[in-house]
Image: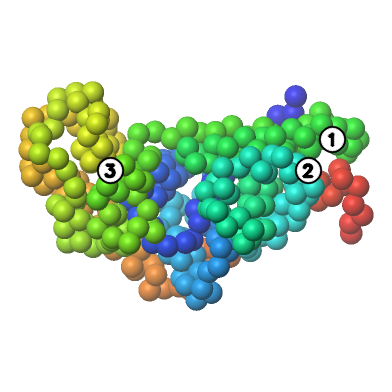
Amino acid sequence: MAQFKERVFSGVQPTGNLHLGNYLGAIKRFVTMQETHDCIYCVVDMHAITVWQDPKELTRQIREVTAAFLAAGIDPKKHIVFNQSQVAQHAELAWVFNCIARMGWANRMTQFKEKAGKDRENASVGLFAYPMLMASDILVYRATHVPVGEDQKQHLELTRDIAQKFNNDFAESIAENGFGDVFFPLTEPLIAGPATRVMSLRDGSKKMSKSDPSDYSRINLTDDADTIAQKIRKAKTDPEPLPGEPDGLKERPEADNLVAIYAALTDSTPEDVLRQHGGSQFSGFKASLVDVAVAKLAPIADEMRRLMADPGHIDAVLADGSDRARAIASETMDAVKDIVGFVRAR
């Protein structure tokens, strides 16, 4: 079996305001992973246009996601930070994968069904083909690991299916071109830790979302300290005090959400939080959560604002990262062309 260099790939879409859920579910983990893995972090702007985007707003949001990466502590010199559209091999390999994947596989993708809704005939072809581009994002770097949440597990399974089928379909050519018995790895998930699914501050049964009409449903990464404090104080709760054990949070979604947020921000567990705050009324617990959230998030917001005021610096980071990403992706794509049988310049 071929040996692959361990490499992590992950991406964030530049659509809408980044919020606490994006930070705890993805960006905070990215910062931690860079201490132990070789990481490639991508602003997936090509995925963003599967639904229409205002061009000026898309430009701003690509820079804002990049600013969030940098402000949170990702090191763009040690790791690669870039935007997808600057590396043409993502789209090139996606076409090959469109020809490898089967319609039945794509039809089973639940995220397309959810996003397209009842008006599937009016959805873009790009929205339908999104999972093949996602497979390309990962495999153009022959990434061995991807951090995934619940909503992306099915797409990673499809990525593995595509890699397996490519390896099987072209086994003879892969060997003839000197790549051994397989070319693409079967990428493994890096399972998320606690509080990766952050819920709305107004309704604990719904995921925190940038599309929610109420700004009080979420904490945006650009919120200042006063706004963070106000949103936490106004967060929906119930009249009972906090329990002493996590079992006491069952059927109490808003309480469960706030405890999970506290645990994630302090790198602890719900059990730890409840040992410290069990029996407290929410007024006291919210005051402690405000202190924690402001201490953790306000400096990120301040740094994001500083970075956004210097778009030239952000663009330079993306250009450098794209050059380094392209060097890896072009090597993969050249090999794929040889394996498939395309004629290319030498």
- Distance (Cα) linking label 2 and label 1: 9 Å
Q: Where is residue 251 in the image (x, y as percent from the top left)?
A: 24, 31
Regarding mark 2 in the picture, which secondary structure is present there? Answer: helix
Q: Where is residue 90 in the image (x, y as percent from the top left)?
A: 68, 55
- Distance (Cα) linking label 3 and label 1: 47 Å
- Distance (Cα) linking label 3 and label 2: 41 Å
Query: Counting residues from the N terminus, which is met first, the one under dot 3 or under dot 2?
Result: 2
Q: Where is residue 192 in the image (x, y as percent from the top left)?
A: 43, 35
| Residue on which disc 1 sits | 169
Query: Counting residues from the N terminus, which is met first, the one under dot 2 or under dot 1?
Result: 2
Instruction: Kindly identify the residue that appears in the image at 13 percent across and 45 percent down.
Output: 286
* Residue 183 or residue 231, whichever sits in front: 231
Inspect the image, locate mark 3, and give the three-letter code of the amino acid beneath it: Gly
| Residue on which disc 2 sits | 100
- Please identify the quadrant where the N terminus is shown: top right
* Residue 106 or residue 146, whichever sits in front: 106
* Residue 207 or residue 170, whichever sits in front: 207
Q: In this view, does 16 lie to the left or right of 177?
A: left
Which quadrant would residue 35 be assigned to in this image?
Answer: top left
Q: Position of residue 343 (x, y in %)?
A: 92, 54
| Residue on which disc 3 sits | 204
From this view, report whether residue 198 is shown above or below residue 248.
below
Query: Counting residues from the N terminus, which is met first, the one under dot 3 or under dot 1?
Result: 1
